Amino acid sequence: MSREVKTLYVAEAEDGIRLDRWFKRRWPHLSHVQVQKMARSGQIRVDGSRARPEDRLTAGAAVRVPPIPDPVEKIPGERPTLSDRDVAYARSLVLFEDDMVIALNKPAGLAVQGGTKTTKHVDRLLSAWGEGLERPRLVHRLDRDTSGVLLLGKGPEAAKRLSGAFARRQAKKTYWAIVMGAPKPGAGQIDLALKKSGINDFEIMRPADPKEHGAEPAETAFATISRAAHRASWMALRPFTGRTHQLRAHMKAMGHPILGDPKYGDEASNELSGPLKLQLHARRIELDHPGGGKLIVEAPLSPEMKAGFAHFGFSEDEAEQDPFAGVKRIR
């Protein structure tokens, strides 16, 4: 058992997770009873206060982690949780990997985390790299139907540093999207609080007064890269906060919903979308590498985005190196 008391920060990908599940993800060998005991005895604290196992955590919260008992060795010959085919698939998604970081090219349609009806997801596939401390950790998330760069931390320390970068808004995330119409102005920043309504598959984010109970601040920079007349625009989007469906909700609030979006689209955008799937792609992430230096990862266009580019006549070489250069209030 390590006698060290640690402070870890809740990753953007873990916003809303229960405290006991947060512990189980990091230390799968812990029993529910062990987590309950540590919480009820005050050994576990969240932002300096006692917390219950069922409490929900928010991104960026500081969790005091007491000494964790060592895992019991696996039984020799125990079967792996993933098939060889699943392992090969997981590793085929790798864009970049070193001893601290893995960057995946998440395809559209693959959920990041599991749910009641979701059995195939990125979190499950991480067993391809091992279990326990060997298992990579999610440090942020993407919507199921959003493709592109997804970062993972190898080991607790790397995951902590990466999660901290996201929590402190030090990660520059650039998304590409095709939206209905031509936003005016063509570049700027939207600061609009969002609030969840509905549950499970019917959950949606709606604009809210910042003072409204449950409202969360949300900020997004936007810049137009190219236009298909007045029909559609190829946009670069940069979220400074990590709210659920933030980019989709913000573009809808601007009156320019992202095409192919069944949840935030309207009659006009649905008609323009036709057979296109969600036109949202996590193109690039830039942040400090947990081992030093800069980490910059780009994901090639997904098949879904390629279909959108072909339909509206966009070409990747139209994009400037920094689409946000000169845009006011970009941090």
Image (cartoon, rainbow, N blue to C red):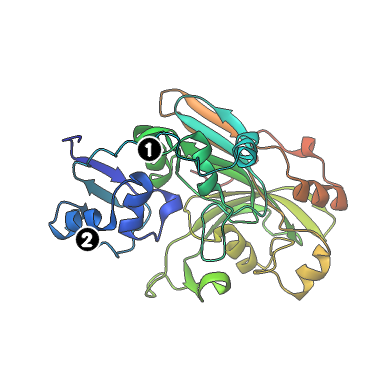
Q: Position of residue 63 (x, y in %)?
A: 26, 49
Residue 127, placed above or below residue 188: above
Residue 111, placed above or below residue 149: below
Residue plotted at (47% across, 53% down): 241
Residue plotted at (28% across, 53% down): 31
Q: CA distance from mark 2 to mark 1?
A: 34 Å
Q: Position of residue 121 (x, y in %)?
A: 57, 52
Q: Secondary structure at mark 2?
A: loop
Residue plotted at (22% across, 47% down): 64
Judged left or right of residue 199, residue 261 is: right
Residue 214, placed above or below residue 90: below
Q: Nearer the viewer, residue 63 or 3?
A: 3
The furthest residue to the left? 41
Counting other residues with Cα less than 10 Å from the Cα at mark 2, is it few (<14), some (14-19), or many (20 or more)?
many
Q: Position of residue 81 (x, y in %)?
A: 51, 44
Residue 125, placed above or below residue 144: above
Residue plotted at (48% across, 54% down): 242
Which circle's residue, 2 or 1, is located before the other in the chain? 2
Q: Nearer the viewer, residue 124 or 295?
A: 124
Q: Nearer the viewer, residue 187 or 119?
A: 119
Q: Position of residue 288 (x, y in %)?
A: 45, 30
Residue 60 visible to an observer of this rendering: no
Judged left or right of residue 271, residue 37 is: left
Provide the residue designation for mark 2.
Answer: 51
**Rendering quarter of residue 298:** top right
Residue 99 visible to an observer of this rendering: yes
Provide the residue designation for mark 1.
Answer: 75
Q: Identity of the amino acid at label 1?
A: Ile
